[in-house]
Amino acid sequence: MDLDELYQEVILDHYKHPRGTGLREPYEGESHQVNPTCGDEITLRVHVEDGRLADVSYQNVGCSISKASASVLYELVNDVPVDEARTKMDEFTELMNSKGLGEPDEDTLEDAVAFTGVSKYPMRVKCALLGWMALKDALIRAEASVPTPRGGAE
Amino acid sequence: MEAVNSLDVEAVRADFPILQRKIGDKPLAYLDSAATSQKPAQVTDAMRRFSDYSNANISRSVHTMAAEATDAYEGARAKVASFIGAPSPDEVIFTKNSTEAINLMTYAFQNASVERGADPRFTLRPGDEVVVTEMEHHANLVPWQQLCLRTGATLRWLGVTDSGRLDLDDLHEVVNERTKVVSFTHVSNLLGTVNPTAAVVARAKEVGALVGLDSSQAAPHLPVDVAGLGVDFIAFTGHKMLGPTGIGMLWARAELLGAMPPFLSGGSMIETVTMERTTFAGPPAKFEAGTPPVAEAVGLAAAIEYLEALGMDHVRAHEQDMAGYMLEGLGAVDGLTVIGPDVPTDRIATVSFTFADIHPHDVGQVLDSEGIAVRVGHHCAKPTCARFGVTATTRASAHVYTTTDEIDRLVSALEKVRKVFA
Ligand SMILES: Cc1ncc(COP(=O)(O)O)c(C=O)c1O
């Protein structure tokens, strides 16, 4: 197997220097996701303001793929309109289900195109999607919650 | 009882066709036998011979093949009985795997607890206690935990020391007059520890509790003698002892099997049936509802024959050598921490470790690129992982076909892992 294809420089860089980590306030939706096969975990919060994802914050433990994916997620969807974030989420999910055959759009997915190789490894696709599942869930929760002035749900 | 390692590993390897395969362009180094072992050609040949020549359902028809199939299936039962020193083949129940064998026990308790007139040894009420350990595979934890939740009994457990041994300091407190059953792992699948069964069994007997073992990781590597162990039941599984998947075993004392309510019910386990009522056959049939895994039993018997031909003392000695070699090699790797006993005494060659801050998934992936198959994750022992403050480990495990060369490859590939993630 071609290790370099899986562990692209971009991925290792995000893993070693993750962007946007830490849980922040305010937020309207929070999601906790676990990968039961390996114990990887992420808690992710979204702060939505005027239809934009004003902040995405997260804390996670996991492998290089799941950590790099969360970091790339932050770069892609932080401070973008919610609709656009959803589009990117769908594109990334589709890429991960492409079994290595996806042809991602670098304009929308940016660093996330480096994950094309990951989609060839079924055992690792779940790692790459963990943060995105948390984002999807947190957005649903944010929509359902009535925003409070301080934003916290707890 | 240290036997000299006189296993001819190269001759053994020649019997395992899968060991010839390559992963990419690298020869396979299979160090994941604790998850499932590989099968020698003798096992697959026996299964194919049965399927191509004698396949029939058992105990149902009078034709020649049905008789052959019944003989083969019952022959396998006798083979298992003699392998573990059971006084009678009728004490061996075939199941799907260890998990089902353990559930067969826990459901005997659960069913007895709701049926009238059940044997009191199997009835659980609030105030009764069930004992396991903190080093169980989920298969010997979750069923007992669920049983306790449903009956109101209390689940208790023996702890694990920092060096990965069973903590017997509070044995007398944890196993006490309220204890009705103690079920613990014979050998830990995560730590590799071979447990001191005698002390726990003696205490269980002293308080009048039933006591059994999860021998899933013991039967493949050590001589197991149920009479010598003095236990009431053991569970083990075919696919970890060079046999096929789809077959496991429960052994229990005949008298207990007689007193236990059945787990699954349906065909083949009855004495007589009317629309209103059923009376059950005696053991083992009482616990084997439906068509059993006949071809798998044939394969299992061939696996046991294979192990017996090698000699379980020699299998054990080789295992011990591999354990020592693994601990030495891995112990010298900078940043590597063994989770479990760091000496080869009372342990098998199943070694879990953490490596620097690198996630086991990443370790396993890079090792795979070198053709080395290890297991990564929590190994179905989450509480044991939690006990050692980790969510996952990398685990290398050996069997009769494992070579020191494969272990050397593992150790040097860890340097490649380090390079990728440094
Ligand atoms: C100690 C132990 N108990 C139980 C099991 C469960 O075996 P099976 O999956 O064959 O039921 C395993 C294997 O995974 C094990 O290692």
Image (cartoon, coloured by chain):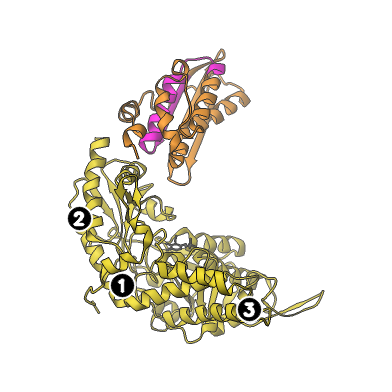
Q: Colour of chain B?
A: yellow
Q: Are marks 2 and 1 on the same chain?
A: yes
Q: Is residue A67 above or below residue B231?
A: above
Q: Which segment did they paint magenta? A: A55-84
Q: Is residue A7 above or below residue B411?
A: above
User: Disc 2 vs disc 1: which is toward the camera?
Assistant: 1
Quick one: SS at disc 3? helix
CA gap between label 1 and label 3 equals: 35 Å
- Within the magenta stretch, is there residue A60? yes
The three-letter amino acid code for the residue at tag 2 is Gly
Tell me if residue B29 can be seen: yes
The residue carrying pointer 3 sits among few (fewer than 14), some (14 to 19) or many (20 or more) residues within 10 Å by Cα, namely some
**Residue B332 placed where, x, y %?**
17, 52
User: Residue B205 lies in what quarter of the image?
Assistant: bottom left
The structure residue drawn at horizontal position 41% and vertical position 20%, both measured from the top left corner, is A75
**Residue A136 placed where, x, y %?**
55, 28
Q: Is residue B81 above or below residue A24?
A: below
- Within the magenta stretch, is there residue B139? no
Return the residue found at the far front. B53
The residue at which mark 2 appears reads as: B329
**Residue B146 placed where, x, y %?**
56, 60
